[in-house]
């Protein structure tokens, strides 16, 4: 396994294919390579990628990072984060004093801490999740490789990966872990494309097939959680979609034509769910 520390990371290694530990998020997101989130924009239109604004840090993003840390790296969470139990207003003097000692992203109010720790605790009762998270593995492991088909530099970041048995767990905070609800999330957020893209990068670097699974956990109590693995059809659709997006990115990058959505006039119908509702009323 070609696993290197961020301090030793070079462009040559990125092209050959490697995994990088301890890479700051800012360095990962600013790297000159194509990620799944960039392909999501291309799928909307290449212009949406060309005009994309740099992501601004939000409190929700900070809480998301805290959840990932608490679940995937509990020892680091205990060391790096401070939970102000009983303090739920960030305007309070106790919160302001705590932020002076640590960055605001690492200081959680009581309510925020209860939610993060509640999700962490609930997952402890999921046998599949605990079995994988107790294996020797890496959290937030960055990966880089050159696509041999397009010549485009690719990147991804695995939430939790056990390289020695080719397993990956991707943590998803959601509102509803039930089958129908998460099925919609997969389609809406293109999680099937993520599965295929991350698996492709892994195969290019290691030569091995990756087993990719989603650990879903509800944000609100009782923090229901469930592990899902996509079926073969979903994986195949994800593969076709990311390959098409990557090919279009490559073509736009070579031509310099980052075109937008086609502007031809079009006849518009109601969505199927609205038509179904109307049929029920008529019946």
Image (cartoon, rainbow, N blue to C red):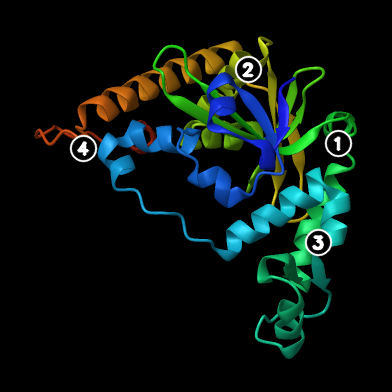
| Quadrant in which the N terminus appears | top right
**The quarter of the displayed image where residue 79 is located:** bottom right
Chain-order first, disc 3 or disc 1: 3
Q: Which mark is residue 260?
A: 4
Cα separation between marks 2 and 4: 33 Å
Residue in the picture at 29% in, 48% down: 51
Q: Nearer the viewer, mark 1 or mark 4?
A: 4
Question: Residue 175: horizontal and vertical position, in percent?
Answer: 63, 48
Chain-order first, disc 1 or disc 4: 1
Q: Nearer the viewer, mark 2 or mark 4?
A: 2
Q: Report the residue marked by disc 2.
A: 205
- Mark 3 touches mark 4? (CB < 8 Å): no
Q: Report the residue marked by disc 1.
A: 126
Cα separation between marks 3 and 1: 25 Å
Question: Residue 49: horizontal and vertical position, in percent?
Answer: 33, 41
Chain-order first, disc 3 or disc 4: 3
**Label 2 residue SS:** helix
Structural crowding at the residue carrying mark 4, measured as other residues with C-alpha within 10 Å and reported as few (<14), some (14–19) or many (≥20): some
**The quarter of the displayed image where residue 226 is located:** top right
Q: Residue furthest bottom?
A: 93
Cα separation between marks 2 and 3: 32 Å
Question: Residue 178: horizontal and vertical position, in percent?
Answer: 67, 36
């Amino acid at each position: 396994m070609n696993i290197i520390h961020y301090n030793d990371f070079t462009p040559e290694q990125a092209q050959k294919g490697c995994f990088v530990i301890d890479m700051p998020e800012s360095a990962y997101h600013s790297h000159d390579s194509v990620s799944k989130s960039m392909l999501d924009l291309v799928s909307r239109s290449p212009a949406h990628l060309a005009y994309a604004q740099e992501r601004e840090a939000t409190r929700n993003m900070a809480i998301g990072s805290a959840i990932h840390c608490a679940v995937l790296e509990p020892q680091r969470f205990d060391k790096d984060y401070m939970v102000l139990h009983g303090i739920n207003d960030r305007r309070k003097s106790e919160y302001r004093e705590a932020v002076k000692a640590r960055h605001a992203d690492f200081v959680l109010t009581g309510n925020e801490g209860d939610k993060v720790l509640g999700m962490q605790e609930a997952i402890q009762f999921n046998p599949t999740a605990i079995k994988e998270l107790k294996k020797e593995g890496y959290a937030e492991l960055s990966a880089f490789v050159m696509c041999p088909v397009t010549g485009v530099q690719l990147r991804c970041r695995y939430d939790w990966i056990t390289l020695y048995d080719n397993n990956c767990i991707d943590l998803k905070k959601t509102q509803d872990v039930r089958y129908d609800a998460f099925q919609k999330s997969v389609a809406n957020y293109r999680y099937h494309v993520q599965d295929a893209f991350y698996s492709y990068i892994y195969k290019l670097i290691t030569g091995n097939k990756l087993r990719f699974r989603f650990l879903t956990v509800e944000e609100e109590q009782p923090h229901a959680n469930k592990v899902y693995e996509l079926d073969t059809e979903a994986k195949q659709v994800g593969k076709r979609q990311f390959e098409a997006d990557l090919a279009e990115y490559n073509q736009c990058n070579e031509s310099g034509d980052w075109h937008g959505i086609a502007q031809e006039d079009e006849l518009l119908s109601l969505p199927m769910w609205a038509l179904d509702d109307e049929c029920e009323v008529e019946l």
